[in-house]
Amino acid sequence: MKPSTKNKIIIVDDHQLFSQSLELLINSFKDFEVINRFENGKVFLSYLQEQPDAEVDLILLDVNMPVLDGVSTMKWIKENRPDLKVIALSVNDDEEIIIKMITNGAKGYLLKDTSPEIFKEAIISVIEKGFYFTELVSGMLVKKANDDSKKINLKEKEIVFIKHACTEKTYKEIASEMCLSPKTIDGYRECLFDKLEIKTRIGLVLYAIKHKIVLV
């Protein structure tokens, strides 16, 4: 964290009451300040294009917005400003949406009913360490996610399966792609969940990103 200046944060959210309340909360934290708020992805991206040198340490990006939603905004950021750190905000923990946000470069995913304490922990973690995912969202204990002491040997087909799991394909589509039965794919999934000590497909995606099986 910067020793002499406050970390600059931008909020992109179409709900004004939530956005204003979030700004008040962030500005109450030491070393943080909200420098701008935008009501959707389109006006935010216009700002980035008009001010490419604007200093910003963290983006808080709502997933569900009119005009240009969080997923589309993240896709643009991934292609044009991959240096930006983003935490996605949402009212639900839909697995498909979480995976889309993560694979497009989001460094964290928080539910909007997150406590102020967890929220502060998350923004500090993303700025200092580069990521933050709760067990509720990831299905993977943070302690285990950070534990590199245990090397896990993965078979070639397991790695292929993990790469497919990091896309928007359904398990049925993955089975077809790999020329295997859906039952065999279910077996791969359960075996990997057990081997990697994870509980969800989101956890699998996070493992793949952390261990550079896929690059985002």
Image (spheres, rainbow, N blue to C red):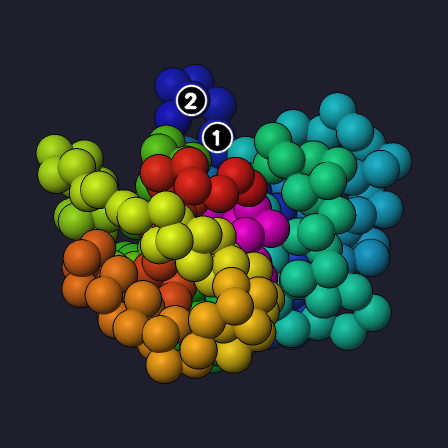
Q: Position of residue 167 (x, y in %)?
A: 56, 60
- Residue at horizontal 55 percent and vertical 41 percent from the top: 216
Asked if residue 107 lies in the magenta stretch, the reply is: yes
- Residue at horizontal 72 percent and vertical 29 percent from the top: 54
User: Mark 1 belongs to which amino acid?
Assistant: Lys
Taking 131 as reference, is 58 left or right? Answer: right
Q: Is residue 47 above or below residue 149?
A: below
| Rendered image quadrant of residue 84 | top right
Q: Which residue is mark 1?
A: 6
Q: Is residue 8 above or below residue 88?
A: above
- Disc 2 packing (10 Å; few <14; some 14–19; many ≥20): few
Depth check, mark 1 against mark 2: the one in front is 2
**Label 2 near label 1: C-beta < 8 Å?**
yes
What is the count of numbered marks?
Answer: 2
Q: In this picture, which residue range is highlighted in magenta? A: 100-109
Q: Position of residue 137 (x, y in %)?
A: 35, 67
- Residue at horizontal 26 percent and vertical 61 percent from the top: 192
Label of residue 2 in the image = 2
Q: Position of residue 114 (x, y in %)?
A: 36, 68
Taking 173 as reference, is 183 left or right? Answer: left
- Disc 1 packing (10 Å; few <14; some 14–19; many ≥20): some
Q: CA distance from mark 1 to mark 2?
A: 7 Å
User: Mark 2 belongs to which amino acid?
Assistant: Lys
